[in-house]
Image: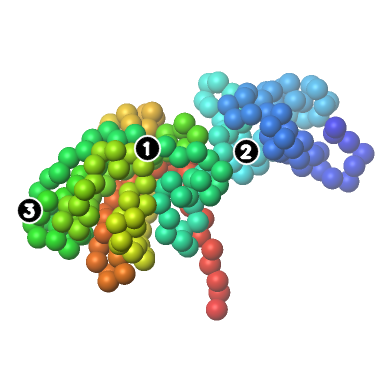
Amino acid sequence: MIKKSSPVPIYFQIEQLMREKIEKKELKPGDMIPSEREFAEKYQISRMTVRQAINNLVNEGYLQRVRGKGTFVAVKKFEKNIQRLTSFSEDMRSRGFEPGTQVLDFTIIEADPLIASKLEVEEGAKVYQIERLRIADQQPIAFEVFYMSEDLVPGVTKEVAEHSIFRYVEEIGLHITSGVQELEATTAHKREATALGIKVGAPILYIQQISFLEDKQPLEFVKSYYRADRYKYKVEMVRN
């Protein structure tokens, strides 16, 4: 209910009303909200006031505008805290989502100079190259290309790659201790766009990761492409 006599600004009351409807799931991701004109007529307020409220909710990630169609409840983004090294499956389960993996390609290749340098193996060494689509609650979240030395971790199969490779590595007695990530904003090329179900040129997060064993030996080199509309990173910082 909008109260014009309240000291709380009307635009803020509209924001609160919409947030509550979204958080209580009265409005679900993908639902279209009423137009500015419909809001203004319903509550007898100016369209400028409605526009301010909607703009704020768009900026906060609650709503999403689609050119030529309208304004919709946004799909909630998966949030990654980068203080801990976790697998995709562990990360999704910790948030209450059901992870899934679709192996798009599984081959063993000879390491080129780049892969050899990342994994600290000889050029030409046998390396797993695995392309996987990572899924959460049946939504495609990331497309990744994964490399790992066959000599270091023997016995990896397509069936293993359909689940958590981290778990397999630890089950055979290796201890994963740390990792380094590099993240940048970019746009999707045809391969990533096709896998993720987005348009070529859509914004994505590109992440390179190297994970290490306890002796600082590189375990994996992974290139991941995350949907920017469904995934975000959270960094906690401390000022000393």
In 3D space, how far apart are the residues under numbered discs 2 and 1 (Cα atoms)? 28 Å
Mark 1 Cα within 10 Å, few/some/many (few <14, many 20+)? many
Mark 2 Cα within 10 Å, few/some/many (few <14, many 20+)? many
Q: Which mark is residue 101?
A: 1
Tell me which residue sits at (69%, 38%) in the image. 23
Q: Is any part of residue 112 visible from this angle?
A: no
Closer to the camera, 201 or 148? 148
* Kind of residue at disc 3: Gly
* Kind of residue at disc 1: Thr
Q: Residue furthest left?
A: 124
Tell me which residue sits at (30%, 62%) in the image. 174
Mark 3 Cα within 10 Å, few/some/many (few <14, many 20+)? few
Closer to the camera, 155 or 27? 155
Tell me which residue sits at (58%, 34%) in the image. 74
In 3D space, how far apart are the residues under numbered discs 3 and 1 (Cα atoms)? 28 Å
Q: How is the image coloured?
A: rainbow
Per the image, the residue denoted by label 3 is 124
User: In the picture shown, does residue 180 fall above or below 75?
Assistant: below
SS at circle 3: loop
* Kind of residue at disc 2: Tyr
Residue 101 falls in image quadrant: top left
Is residue 68 left or right of 33 when viewed as pictured? left
Residue 6 falls in image quadrant: top right
Q: x and y percent of residue 130 in the render? A: 24, 42
In the picture, the quarter occupied by the C terminus is: bottom right
The disc, 3 or 1, on the residue closer to the chain's N-terminal end is: 1
The disc, 3 or 2, on the residue closer to the chain's N-terminal end is: 2
Per the image, the residue denoted by label 2 is 62
Closer to the camera, 89 or 72? 89
Is residue 35 left or right of 87 when viewed as pictured? right
Is residue 83 left or right of 42 when viewed as pictured? left
- Confirm or deny contact between disc 3 and disc 2 (CB under 8 A): no
